[in-house]
Amino acid sequence: MPDKPKLSVYWASSCGGCEIAVVNLHEKILEVDRNFDFFFCPCLLDTKYRDIEALDDGAIAITLFNGAIRTSENEEMALLLRRKSQLLIAYGSCSAGGAIPALSNLSTRAGHMRTNYLEGPSLDNPGGILPQTATLVPEGELELPAFFETVKTLPQVVEVDYYIPGCPPESKQIWSVVEAVIQGTPLPPRGSVLGGGCSTVCQECAKVKSDKKIAAFHRTYEIVPDPRQCLLEQGLICLGIATRDGCGALCPAVNMPCTGCYGPPEGVADQGAKMLAALGSDLDLGGYKGLTEEQVARQADAILAGIPDLAGTLYRYSLAGSILRRRSQ
Amino acid sequence: MKTGVYLCACGGTITEKVNFEKVAADLGKNPEVAYVHTAEFLCSEEGKQFLEQDLTEHRPERVVIAACSPREIEGVFMQVMERVGLNPYFLQIANIREHVAWITPDPERATAKASALVRGAVARVGLHQPLERKELDVCRDVVVVGAGPAGLKAALCLAEAGRKVVLVEKTPVLGGMPVRYEELFPNMECGPCLLEPVMGEVLHGEHAHNIEILTLSEVVEVKGYYGNFAVTIKQAPRYVDTVKCVGCGECIAACPAATKNEFNYGLDERKAISLPFAGSLPNVPFLAFDACLRAHGEDCQLCRAACPVEGAVRYDDSAKLLERSAGAIVVAVGSDLYDCTRLPALGYGSVSGVYTSLEFERLLARNGPTGGELRLPDGTPPKSVAIVHCVGSLDEHHQPYCSGVCCNYAFKFNHLVRKQLPESRIHHLYKELVTPGKEEFALCRHAGHDPQTSFWRYGDIADLQVAAEDGHHTIRYRDTAGTSGQIEADMVILCPAMVGPESAGRLSAVLDTPPDQFGFFQELHGKLDAAQSKVRGIYLAGACQSPMDIRGAIGQGIAAAGYVLSGLAEGRKLTIDPITAAVNELACSGCRVCGSVCPYKAISFPPDKQVASVNALLCHGCGTCGAACPAAAIQAHHFASPQIFAEMEAILQ
Amino acid sequence: MTEPMTLAATEAASPGPFEPKIVAFLCNWCSYAGADKAGAAQIPCPDNVRVIRIMCSGRVEPEFVLQAFRLGADGVLILACHAGDCHYKEGNYRAIQRHRLLLQMLEQFGIDQQRCRLDFVAASEGEKYVRVLTETVEAIRTLGPLGLGPPEAAAAPGPV
Ligand SMILES: Cc1cc2nc3c(=O)[nH]c(=O)nc-3n(C[C@H](O)[C@H](O)[C@H](O)COP(=O)(O)OP(=O)(O)OC[C@H]3O[C@@H](n4cnc5c(N)ncnc54)[C@H](O)[C@@H]3O)c2cc1C
Ligand code: SF4
Ligand code: SF4
Ligand code: SF4
Ligand code: FES
């Protein structure tokens, strides 16, 4: 049906939860199908690369691009889909901020190769063979996409029209774009975060908040938090304070601290740094009177010892898009 | 952005190292820079005139001055900007003197660094906001808490200047501690008399109509901030109308109920309706309901019946909550004595004949329990008196400081005892002797020359032991060399450290002024602003801030009044420095991360909004909350992140 | 006067040692005054450090530090009032706490702790100011450039 606008969903470096969110449209998916030509979605449809290449530029109305840019293949698809799409939407936290795949930026490519192909306890690789971009076999040359040193976000590779963050995103946000396009209602300014607010998750969180003073940090399995009170105040690292609102505070509502999947709030460049700033401001040393600089530092360290993997915790969804982006080499 | 740049040579001390031509050439490439002008001495009178004319002529949108430290010069040039009608906050100083020319030996490097700093200033100043000093109407009335010498003097100064003052005193009497002393060091003038004229003025003087005196009262709640405090005062019932009462004392004579007299530290009794002591002001008895027979179910009405004035004694009086507004609060609640029972070996509370210095003051006072006569329990005068100095002072296990008052009153005691009992022996046991001041030493010398007075220096008060045997005390001590000694005395006087007032905890919680490590009210700065608390608009006077004598307390009372009069000056509004924090209410989530960081409690969360709100009057502009806010919802005016980033980017180029 | 200048000129001509770029955040009341003091005493000081004045060390956001690295700084210095001396009572304590967190995190980013130093300089400590600066410059000179460079370079692709 050539008159229907084309919709594509692409899966780069990510877990597939974003596709599940599409399926989670439930019966609305039929509506999508009625109004769109669901043209490309490697996990559901058999459209080929060359089919997309063959399209005119801008032939796809909407592309929901999920996943970070980990390999040359991810990058190539990003460039191609950008060219072919009118609206390219960074869909899900991996494409917007790098998310879990980008935590590998805290290590190096060589390190990953070593761990995955040489040192893993379940490996049997006596020859120490590492994957190659090109391998000659009797049948000809086999090709693998290159594995980048650094995981990038989608906007670091191509221009992005909109963002739908979330890990996974909320199906209702997909629906709201689809609906807007169907009905021709004007979309928000380019670059907007669809369904995102201009504050942080705490605004939507119903927990009772008081002036924060944190005397100890705990992991979620270590304590049973008071369900009425702010989790951060109880020592659970809740990223709600430094995470864009819009999700409806789903996690804290069930006593799980926010892990930050909506990314940094409006106007914030670095979610992790903001978390750091806030945590560093609210440590409860029980008063400073008479303490030396050294004692303050030691007491702070003692409290901070309760946080394993600080960078991984504070940058769970935003490392690739952060100021430092990766471990320095 | 059209930015005018001025390079000041500072009489050649900058140009000796920094090549202005090169700096100017560098800046010439910068599209933001409209012009670069140089001056020999920009801060001189001619220099400022030149700047004024030049700014008028070129009308730049922003100004960068490369000269000496902004700490020195910023204010001067801001004034010039204001004169020519430019917003003074559109200025940025690049410090190329102290931070470049004077510390960089190599001229080439100095020039490069100067260029970078000026570049940074240009980049930053383009983002400066047109900040305005705001003005606010204020309440000029004052609440003074505590009616000792410090509070009385502060109240009087303010009333004389035409200010309305509410004087809140916890007890039924004015005058604080000194009205309970017979005589005062250093000149041995009469204690109650010293403050008489001040209290007279406060009660009946020309400006008394400006002072509302609330006795038996305490401040229970304070809301608001400098210029606009709302103060709630709880007044306990006196049961005697202070206006109607003529002070004849007929009621006291008629009262059949007696109770321990706390104004004499329980050393005698008083009536349920009584004056604290003879001559106490205001001259209006008060009824202590606990001691009154009416509290015990009897319908005694003897005092009311005895009173010649209709309606002066009122059994239906009750506690009141009074609301007063004030622009400033003066705290003058005095001090307490270190608890001597924490040194049990000294026998206080367990051995009779051992007194604290305050109790001893009452024993010496003619309006005290013994009419001023020193007597042992058996009624005979003591033949020997031991005065122990430094009780709980200069001691790591107790209070580490010296109160600076005790030695002086110990020698005052020496003088009074000698006058009354010429034959008696007086022993001073001390750790250190401290009597600074141009008059104070006289009493000490006097004691030193008295053949019947002896001095014993002990090493550690922990080695001091007071034991009693049939009314006779033996004091064992060890001197600084470790040698033990022993003194006999009929009466033992302990001179404990002055400590923060008992009410400091409650009151400082109400006022939000945390006490210092010793329990005194904490001053803003020990030298520059000892009469100011850390909260704007709350001032400190007298011994509640630090141990001090009456002269010091009076001086601080005047100082506190001076702060109020200059800060809340007549006909002037309060100006608010615009370098404060400001909340973007749309971005703020109400997470309250910032709530605990402000050292001045300037951040609050009004319940109707659920987002942070910075009180610009309380904010001192440190920017800590701006750094803490994880939502970037707080902007630190004049030190905003974009400004810092721009400066950083330019200087790193 | 001519002698050292010739020396400096020859030094400038040869490639010379690595000259680190360092950004220093100085609180207005103590550290900046201390720096001024060093200036007034004309104590020679390495020119690698560029000062940014802030009112209090409590204003320093971790983002400032990260951004400084990103913009090409090889090191960052935060100078504050000594404990108990902060003009705003507690700003320096918050600075210490945030600094401890930063150090813990920078380590995970492979950035040596010496590149982010917090120290305390009073208004009277002109000499300490110069000492801290000199030590920091030397420490970072030894470490070499941070080499974060523009973000694009860090993200350059390569074969597996
Ligand atoms: C034994 C002794 C002898 C001394 N002799 C001398 C001397 O000879 N010469 C000399 O110069 N100094 C002497 N001093 C020091 C002198 O007592 C103090 O310097 C002086 O009392 C300080 O005055 P002030 O107004 O600060 O406090 P105070 O005199 O203590 O007055 C404080 C007032 O505040 C009231 N108050 C307390 N709490 C509250 C509250 N919460 N609300 C309302 N009101 C409250 C108290 O009832 C009191 O009226 C002596 C001290 C001692 C201990
Ligand atoms: S639980 Fe988390 S999201 Fe909720 S108020 Fe606390 S910090 Fe914010
Ligand atoms: S820290 Fe920021 S977001 Fe949180 S309450 Fe304060 S101003 Fe609002
Ligand atoms: S800038 Fe400082 S003083 Fe002002 S509100 Fe923020 S923390 Fe308080
Ligand atoms: S003012 Fe110097 S650290 Fe706060």
Image (tube, grey):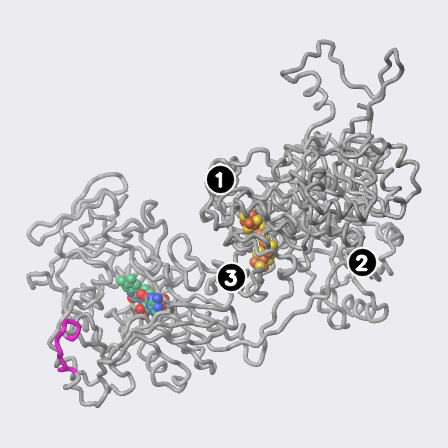
* Image quadrant where one finds the N terminus of chain B: bottom right
Which numbered dot is residue B528? 3
Examine the image and state in which quarter residue A154 appears.
top right
Foreground of the two, C2 or B228: B228
Badge 1: few (under 14), some or many (20 or more) residues near its Cα, within 10 Å? some
Foreground of the two, B178 or A84: A84
Chain ID of residue with mark 2: A
Residue carrying label 2: A186
Chain ID of residue with mark 1: A
Instruction: Report whether mark 2 lies on the same chain as mark 1.
Output: yes
Decide if ligand 3 comes within 8 Å of the CB at mark 2: no
Q: CA distance from mark 1 to mark 3?
A: 32 Å
Q: Identify which amino acid the numbered label 1 is placed on.
A: Gln
Q: Identify which amino acid the numbered label 2 is placed on.
A: Pro
* Image quadrant where one finds the C terminus of chain B: top right
Residue A304 vs residue B646: left or right? Answer: left
Which numbered dot is residue A299? 1
Residue shown at 52% from the left, 56% from the top = B599
Examine the image and state in which quarter residue B453 appears.
bottom left
Residue A275, x across and y down, in percent: 61, 45
